[in-house]
Image (cartoon, rainbow, N blue to C red):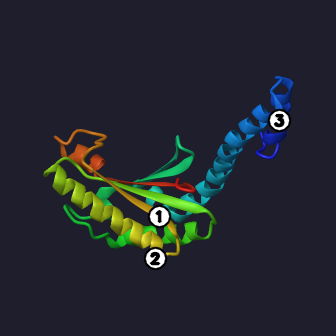
Amino acid sequence: MSRYLAPPLLVALLLVAGCSTTSWQHGLQDILPHAGAEAAVEELTPVVQQALSTEIAAGMATLDRAKEQAVKVHLEGEWCFGVDGASLSPVANAALRRLGRALAGVPGTSVTVTCHTDGIGSLAENQQLSSLRADAVAAVLRAQGLAGVRAEAKGSTEPLATNATEAGRRVNNRIELHIGPNGG
């Protein structure tokens, strides 16, 4: 269904259902911003795919649609940062610069950068490393003219795999970018 047909159809359904004027107006106010977010995400997805096409093809980045109406990019931490380091690799820096420039051209776009570490080391050390990495990624995106960037550090608190194996630790060392309108 076209995004342009949804609001008139919604109004008709609410009226047929016998909603009072204030009820259906309130319902539209709650639903329309959500519909606008979906449309924005549909427009952002090809921008992100184009900017990160090399990394996606090489398996260094994955792209999907997050539940909160954002494009979610998952970047492998191994190619972004060295072990226990917070300096971006040249490859990651170039990819993030491309992405930042592409997103800066889409008005109202914002990015939440969330960095995770493996469970090697103390919680405090991992939190600090995660914070430094999130700040490094956010700084590259901001330098490209993308104003709405927020950095979050999760440390080792949200593992996706076991930290008992090298493969599991590689999965847990990751950067997630939630890209969408007004906060992703």
Real-space Cα distance between discs 1 and 2? 11 Å
Callout 1: helix, strand or loop?
strand
Real-space Cα distance between discs 1 and 3? 35 Å
Real-space Cα distance between discs 3 and 2? 43 Å
Circle on res. 11: 3
- In the image, farthest residue toward the top: 17
Q: Comparing marks 1 and 2, which lies closer to the viewer?
A: 1
When asked about the image quadrant of residue 60, the answer is: bottom left
On the image, the x and y values in percent for residue 183 come to 52, 55
Q: How many residues crowd around disc 1 within 10 Å: few (fewer than 14), some, or many (20 or more)?
A: many
Callout 3: helix, strand or loop?
helix
- In the image, farthest residue toward the left: 121
- Report whether 19 appears left or right of 141: right
Which amino acid type corresponds to the residue marked 2 in the rendered image?
Ala
- Give the labeled residue for mark 1: 149
**First in sequence: mark 3 or mark 2?**
3
On the image, the x and y values in percent for residue 146 come to 52, 70
The residue depicted at 31 percent of the width and 57 percent of the height is 77
Q: How many residues crowd around disc 3 within 10 Å: few (fewer than 14), some, or many (20 or more)?
A: some
On the image, the x and y values in percent for residue 50 come to 57, 62
Callout 2: helix, strand or loop?
helix
**First in sequence: mark 1 or mark 2?**
2
For the residue pair 134 and 174, the one nearer the viewer reads as 134
Q: Is residue 172 above or below residue 22?
A: below
Query: Quick check: marks 3 and 2 in contact, CB under 8 Å?
Result: no
Point out the image quarter for the N terminus: top right
Circle on res. 143: 2
